[in-house]
Amino acid sequence: MFDKLIKKIIELQNPTCIGLDTDFNYLPEDMRSGAETPETAAEQILKFNKAIIDKVCDIVPAVKVQVAYYEMYGTAGIAAFEETLKYAREKGLFVIADCKRNDIGSTANCYSKAYLGVTAVNGNEFTAFPADMLTINGYLGSDGIKPFVEDIKAHDKAVFALVKTSNPSSGEFQNLKLENGKFIYEQMGDLVAEWGKDAIGEYGYSEVGAVVGATHAEEAERLRKRLPHVFFLIPGYGAQGGSAEMLKVCFDKRGLGGIVNSSRGLICAYKNAAYKGMNFADAARAACIDMQKDLVKAIGKMG
């Protein structure tokens, strides 16, 4: 799966992932007006998402959809989440379901079937939530990761395991040192490399990727040197404070090795003075173009 994504990144010269972490309050006032129930809110969120997807699908390779922004609207929100995944794939985008799933082995197996594998009902197989990639949490240990690894091999999918996250307090746990001298995030990175060692593609990256925040450049640089075969999902650019200069350490000498997510900075760009007068979808497209230029300036030509 990452080989296909990398090919698209090279084709577009753009490692941008647009995050549809769509809070109802992010919508323009005219779209929020009159919505008073979870159902009507979810309907407008889906309309907003589709309009943005239509505007950016030819210039960005991927979309990340954070399930929490949909769960809070109940079953109507989950329906909007599912439809957003489907619509993005129909438009040719690679789809990352940002769900950070994990549990003990048997439960993790169910999570994996929902997003990466198939569920069988009396011999009939279906995919509950059609995603190409899924974020997972490996901090429960290897038994909770095995089902995901099995499904990505069987169904040509990929995962991103949390390694060094972009939130300010991530160091409270992830930057603690172990008795062996490693930071916890380094130990997790080593496990990610081990989990994916048998699933390395033509560009040299395994199908078990890592979430590495743009807001922690020193740690990101250490991880890139330590994990030459691990593809990164890089959150934190823009609204969270991460810059292109900070995150360029996540990429290899070919300008490959990661995809950079921005959510609010893109889907709420219409609120930015730089895009004054544009509707939300046109502003999102303009912001994606500006982000691409910024990333290329820092990273260089890809491929």
Image (cartoon, rainbow, N blue to C red):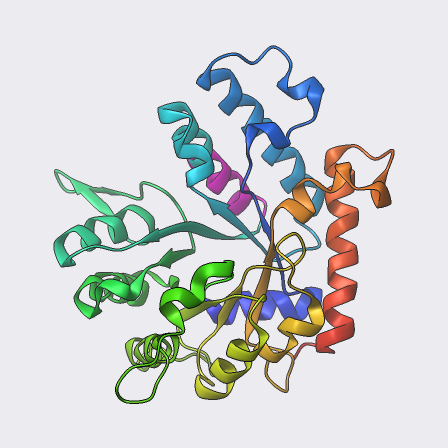
Residue 135 lies left or right of residue 252; in this view the side is left
Residue pictured at 63% horizontal, 32% vertical: 26
- Tell me where residue 299 appears, x and y as whole percent: 70, 76
| Magenta stretch contains residue 15 | no
Quadrant in which residue 206 is drawn: bottom left
Range shown magenta: 82-91
Location of residue 251 with respect to 123 vertically, above or below: below
Residue pictured at 51% horizontal, 61% vertical: 166
| Quadrant assignment for the C terminus | bottom right
Viewer-nearest residue: 262 or 240: 240
| Quadrant assignment for the N terminus | bottom left
Residue 229 lies left or right of residue 287; in this view the side is left
Q: How many marks?
A: 0
Give the prevailing secondary structure in the magenta stretch: helix
| Magenta stretch contains residue 83 | yes
- Tell me where residue 246 appears, x and y as whole percent: 66, 72
Q: Is residue 210 visible?
A: yes
- Tell me where residue 86 appears, x and y as whole percent: 47, 40
Residue pictured at 54% horizontal, 44% vertical: 88
- Tell me where residue 194 appears, x and y as whole percent: 30, 81
